[in-house]
Every structure is written in structure tokens, then in C-alpha cells.
Image: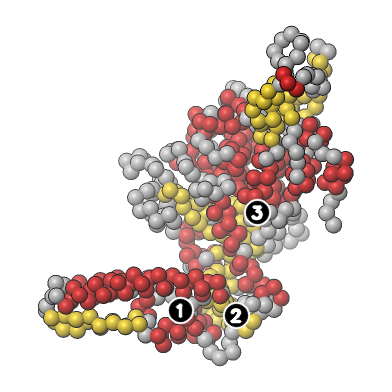
Amino acid sequence: MNIFERGVGGRRYRIASQSLWDPLLQRPFARQAVLGSADPPPVADLGLTRTVGTRRVGDVGALAWVAEQLDLVKLIDQACGVAAPAGGPTAGEMVLAVAVQRACAPAAKSHLAAFLEACVPRVSCLPASAFTGQAFHRLAGQVSAEQLESAQIAIARATAQRFELSTDVLAFDTTNFDTHIATTTPGELARRGKAKSKRSDLRVVGLAVLVSETGHVPLLHRTYPGNGSDQSVLGDCLKALGQLHEALDAGARRGRPGCRTLVRDGGSWSEQLELDLDVEGYATLISLPLSHSASQWALEQAARRAAMKHLGGKLGDVRAARLRTQGGELDRTLVVVESQELLRGQKRGIAAALRKAKEELRKLQRVAARGRITRESLEERVSKALRREHLSEFVVTEVKGNGKRLSLDWHVDAARRRHLERTRLGRRVLCTDRHVWSTGRIVYAFRGQWNVEEVFRRAKRGGLVPWGPSHQWVDSSLRLHSFATVIGLSLVSLVRLALGTRQSALSMMKSLAEVKATLVRVRTQDRGRRPTVMLAPDLSPEQRKAVKVFELERWMPGLLSSMTSDAFRASATPAA
């Protein structure tokens, strides 16, 4: 968006000009909007002024700057090919508006116009009143899942090229979000499944995300039914993964195809899926389920004396054992990694589960002694009490007697518990076809799985860019809502990357949100409506840097006047 000044009737005004793409006519068109007067503010007695409100500048301006760098609106409009209604926003403008709202002030679509009206930076030259919930749902009904997928790939290519992302290692994971959609409401996406929130009474919507190794930037996502499995979702994404692979190579201007590594957890393990990913050009790194035969063999080998060795460098406190095995058509390197943090967490979980199991076993002892339970029912309840946290491996139980003369004996075998902690707890089995990688590189790459988990934490309720609460129930609206949410997550990650800060994303956005314009209404002796002046706030060093990086002075020139000359030069000088 271009900002310039124009003289009209002897006065100067600041004008915003925006170039958009018409998918039907296959040509660009322009919009303009008046931002306000560019004349110097009037001189008035401070005793005759009063504050009438504030307007957002920092957080919205930073997100809008990133969107302009990617040409986000144009990429979405070209991929979707949906004509904007007369006087209404295009699909790209609507998605950007919703994404910015969810990142700055999450609320229902009915509050979108009021949010945009309270912002100095503009995502469109249209009036804020054009952005309504009805307009969002109408656009959602015209956009298909294939078009949104094409938009994602185009955006991923532009992101990797503009911000020079490292995309050789990509982390994949899935989650789901609760909805309050009624059971009788038709729809394919909102389904009852294994909810992450443990709410079995709600229908959930699944979300799979592929994240870059650096910057926590989502590059590809898929909205799927809440009762779907990780394997099926990743299998359905194979075509899109292949297209993404080619787009990232083109964005990086590589002369020959690269080989990227897909990192994921054990929930999506499948031998056929491993072969399919290899066809699409992806190497794999996965944490195998401990119940897998290869995992059990690797754990047995790692339990031998001196098999686990300390890694060097930044992973000096980590122990690992490296093995190689052949399973069917797959030749894989296995790395058994020991994590003290995971071990401590599992010990706490076992201790809590053991306390509950002991209470249940004592209760069953009394019930059996009174002859009020059958043998089959007693064995079933004992098995249920020991089902969690490996309790059945070291809690020894025995049911004696027949008929109504039953007894239950049990005890905790300390030797078995120590053996479990020494050979199984706190350990993961990593499986990869990257045979030339060092053990440290394999462990470090798998730790990148934390990146996608961090993105999910930001998208959960109470997070930075929450997916919910969702106020739509049609599949098309849910799909476009998820798309806008992921775009919001991407914009926040890129803002943090461009700013080069070590602050968390939440702290960074709070700091940017404090860059606000204070509206002051001035009383003068002149006739006509009393003018309103925007006053700039005092800025911290981090905020001064953000003003320069994201060019916030375009929207509010007064921000530069609030910076001293020394601070201005310091913020403009790049860090060593």
C-alpha cells in the first residue's frame, strides 16, 4: 500500500493507494482512501483539549507490513479467482483482515468492522463497515479447498524467498479444536473424535500443520474431520507436499531439486507412507511408538553396558545410542535418546497414577473379601486400574479362590520398577533414513518438532492467535476461518523474525500493541468541526526499532517526532 500527499482546495491530505488483482479480467485495479489531513495540527490551549480515545498502530502496522512484503492479498486473490462484490472486500482482503484481528484482538466476525475502525494502519482502502460476518461467509462459500491449498503453496514460496527461511527440515503435527456445533447440524469437518481437550461431548475440527525449522512459520496446513487419523491426513497431503517441495525449490532458486526432511511423531507411522514420502522427495525422521518391534529391539540394545554415550557440543548433557536395522523394504537408522526432563515427567505421572491405583486395589480387596464381586469382574477392574503409566509392568497382582471366596493380593515390585526406569522410561526411539547425518544432527532436527507444538500453543484458547471460539458451522466457513488463523500465526512468526528479537512472540506483540495513537480533540476559535489530533507515545528502544523496521511512520508521522535524534540513529543502525 502506497502512502502519499495530495493538495485539494488549498489543503493537503494523506492518501492511501492500494493495487488489487481482478481474477475475472486478469488485470490489476486500484483503490484509494483519504487517511486524513496532512496540514500541521492547530495551535490550541492545552486546557481546552481532551482525550477521546486511542487507535492501534504498532501491532497492526507490523502485521500489515509483512503482508505487503509477501503481496499476500494478491497471492490469495489469484489462487482463489473469486470476484469481489461491488463495494465489498476481495477474498485476500477479508482473509488478511480476519488474520490481523485474530492476532491482535480475537473476537467474532461481527466485531471485525469495529476492530478495523480502531486501527490507524489499513488492510484495505474500503471502509471498515464493508468487513462483515455476512461478507466473510459469502466469500467462504465461493472458495474451494483446492484453491486455498494453491494459495498456501504460493504464500510459502514467497515467504521462503523474501525472508530466506531454512526449509530443509520441516516439522509436521496435528491437533484439534473444540466447537459448540449442535449434533444435528450437518457437516463433514466437525466430528466427535479424540479431543485434545478431553471433552468427549463436543464435536472437534482437526488441523494439520507443516512448520519451517527456523522462525516457527507455518508453510502448509490442512483442515480435516475431527475423527480422522494422522496417517490418513498425511497421506491425503502427499500431492500438496510434492507441490510445496517444488515451490520451495523455485523460491530458493536451486539449480537441482533439494532433499527435505519431514519430522513427525509416532502417530503417523506407516511403512507405505514412508515409501510414498520418498517418492515425493522427502526424507523422514520420526519418533517410533515404543510398542513397535523395532523400538523394543533398539531399547534392548541400548540397555547394554556402555551403549548410551554422551553427545558433544550443545547436546553434551544428552545420551544416545545409534543402531541400524533393515525392516521389510526400509533401511533405517535408529537413535535411542535419553531425556532427563522426559524421565522426570514420566516419574511424576507414574507416582500420581500409582496413588490412584493403590486406592482402587485396596477397595477391590475389601469388595472381594466380602464376596460381592465375581472373579471375571474383579480381574477386569484390576486390569483397568493398572492400565495407565506402565503400572502393569511392576505392580504384581494375583486373584485367588473361586465363587464368593475370592481374595486379591498385590504388591509393588521395586526391582521391576527400577528396571523399567533404567531401560524404557525417559527414552525415545528416533527412526530416519538420513544415514549420513551425525547423531547430534538427528537429535537436534527432531527437537524442531517443538516448533509446531509452539504454533499449536499459540492457536489454542488463551493463546496469541486462538482458533476459537469459532462462531461458524458451515464447512466452507470453518475451512476459511482455519486458513485465516494460520495466516495470522504465520504473520506473527515473520514479524518476530524480521524484528530479530529474543522476546517471546507474546511479549513482542504486547510491546507492539503499546504503540498506540492517543486521539486528542482540540478546541480552537476557528469555525467548523473541532479537529482531532493523534499524539505519539513514548517509545522504548525495542519499539523504536520496530518503528523503523516496519515503517510505522507511514501511518503516523508523529512517531518520528517522539524519537530523539540519538535514539533515531541508534534504531536505524543495524546490530553487529
Are the two marked residues, 1 and 2, in contact with CB atoms closer than 8 angstroms?
no
Tell me if 537 is positioned left or right of 79 in this view.
right
Tell me if 556 is positioned left or right of 89 in this view.
right
Quarter that holds the C terminus: bottom right
Quarter that holds the N terminus: top right
Tell me if 254 is positioned left or right of 352 in this view.
right
Q: State whether residue 109 appears in this view.
A: yes
> Which of the two residues, 439 or 59, is positioned nearer the viewer here?
59
- What residue appears at the point 48 percent right and 77 percent down from the top-left corner? 425
> Which of the two residues, 376 or 84, is positioned nearer the viewer here?
376
Residue placed furthest toward the top: 527
Q: Which residue is mark 2?
A: 320
Q: How packed is label 2: few (under 14 Cα within 10 Å), some, or many (20 or more)?
A: many
Query: Looking at the image, is mark 3 or mark 2 nearer the viewer?
Result: 3
Helix or strand or loop: what does disc 1 sit on? helix
> Which of the two residues, 71 or 237, is positioned nearer the viewer here?
71
Residue 103 spot, x, y in % from top left: 60, 43
Helix or strand or loop: what does disc 2 sit on? strand
Q: Which residue is mark 3?
A: 504
Q: Earlier in the sequence, mark 1 or mark 3?
A: 1
Residue placed furthest toward the bottom: 305
Q: Amino acid at mark 2?
A: Ala
Residue 69, picture quadrant: top right
Helix or strand or loop: what does disc 3 sit on? loop
Q: Which residue is mark 1?
A: 293
